[in-house]
Image (cartoon, grey):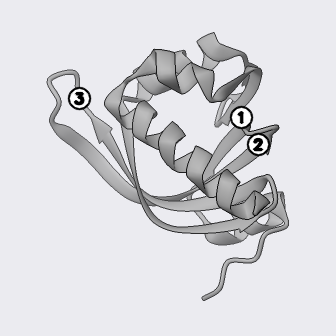
Amino acid sequence: MKNQLTLIVAAKWQQYMNERKYEELLKLTEANIEVVDNKGSNFGHNALLDYINRTGLTLLTVNSYVNEEKLILKHRRIWKSEDGENKKEALVYSYIKMNNGKVAYIQCFNDSEEAENASGISIPN
């Protein structure tokens, strides 16, 4: 049951992020969310919104792998320019941790093995 709830929350969270519905997104996000990128860890709602706006990203889930309140989402990640045009696209893996039904941690990886190692979740070949 917990796996199903985790997937439902993650799907809504991603939908709100892609649609830039920030009020709804933040209702599903821990106040002190940890956002990890290539520059390190940043914390809080502002860090998340800065990351989304800075990267202009959109995520389209291809597959999901869940274990309780941790999951890996395999995505087609699309970076858009300010005028909405696609700048870049790649396959990535987002490692997400939930806490009581809210997203508390997110980190993206370009490699499935790195995502597995960080999360402890196995991704079938």
Frontmost residue, 92 versus 66 = 66
Whether the residues at callouts 2 and 1 have beta carbons within 8 Å, the answer is yes
Which residue is rendered at x = 26% and y = 35% of the image? 80
Give the residue at mark 2.
98
SS at mark 1? strand
Residue 58, above or below 46 = below
- Among all residues in the image, which is located at the extreme top? 46
Q: CA distance from mark 1 to mark 3?
A: 29 Å
Q: Quadrant where the C terminus lies?
A: bottom right
Question: Image quarter for residue 43?
Answer: top right
Does the image show residue 1? yes
Residue 35, above or below 68 = above
Residue 12: percent from the left, percent from the top?
49, 42
Which residue is rendered at x = 69% and y = 47% of the image? 96
Residue type for callout 2:
Met
Which residue is rendered at x = 37% and y = 24% of the image? 20
Q: Earlier in the sequence, mark 3 or mark 2?
A: 3
Q: CA distance from mark 3 to mark 2?
A: 30 Å
| 40 on left or right of 91 | right
Give the residue at mark 1.
102
Residue 100: percent from the left, percent from the top?
82, 37
Q: Nearer the viewer, mark 3 or mark 2?
A: 2
Give the residue at mark 3.
81
Frontmost residue, 89 versus 71 = 71
SS at mark 2? strand
